[in-house]
Amino acid sequence: MFFAPTLLALTRPETGNHVRILCLSTGNADGLGETRKKELVKSGMLLGLRGEDDVVVVDNPTDFPDSMTTKWDEKSVSNLLCSTFAPQLARQRANDAARPTASIDVLITFDAQGVSSHPNHVSLYHGARAFAAALMRGKAGWASPVDLYTLASVSVLRKYVSFLDVFATMATWALGVRHEDRAHPGGLLFMNQLVGEAGLYTACKAMTDAHRSQMLWFRYLWIGFSRYMVMNDLRLEKIKSK
């Protein structure tokens, strides 16, 4: 629903990327958790992941309930990310001379508005920032091993004009995105091709065919009008080391 353009771009074989999905909830609010776990794997494979093991779903409804009203604890999200991607962190903190490391070099998630203001999405943003800060705590002289990019939320009007939002997006980029560091650009823009099987068509199938239990009537409107089916505007988060 939100990250298909990013996944389709980054999983192209010629990029050499190894992309994985970490989902912190089974989506069991309506009792469909097991079904949705399987469907997420199917969606990931359609969007280009290398293997089914590259989709990891956390089943912990105590800490991460699937809820439209519950925020997840920032520290719990950060601790999960640390244990998954930087299990050696405590040992590195004990050694001031040790370079901070992680098993990933880029983490992509929602921004502070979560696109749809879903509290679970917003919690991921705050937890991811806490994780990035934890990696650099006491490591002021080192570069962060992980770049954190977040998916830009836009106004309701822009959200539902599909590919026409490209004009507003490019104007925003021209005014506000800086790319002084080519290795760590301030923003990334991915766009699906509108025709052919490698772009929008595949993004739609990842919902309608693979993630079928999610397909309520209003999600067909999302497919037809949401700019997130066509483009993803990612921004690099600035994390200060302490």
Image (spheres, rainbow, N blue to C red):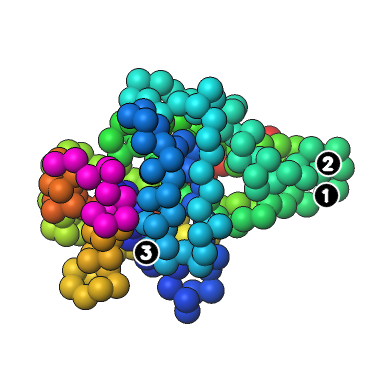
Question: Mark 2–mark 1 contact, CB under 8 Å?
Answer: yes
Residue position marked by numbered label 3 in the rendering = 46
Q: Is residue 215 magenta?
A: yes
Q: How crowded is mark 3: few (under 14 residues within 10 Å), some or many (20 or more)?
A: many
Q: Give the range drawn in magenta.
A: 207-217
Residue position marked by numbered label 1 in the rendering = 98
> Which quadrant would residue 229 be assigned to in this image?
bottom left
Badge 2 amino acid = Arg
Q: What element does badge 1 sit on? A: loop
Q: Nearer the viewer, mark 2 or mark 1?
A: 2
Q: Distance between the residues labelled 2 and 1?
A: 9 Å
Q: Residue 232 carries which label?
A: none
Could you tell me residue 20's position as x and y percent?
52, 56
> Which quadrant would residue 130 be assigned to in this image?
top right
- Side of 26 where 74 appears, left or right: right
Q: Residue at the spot x=19%, y=44% of the render?
A: 219
First in sequence, mark 1 or 3: give its number: 3
Q: Does the magenta stretch include residue 212?
A: yes
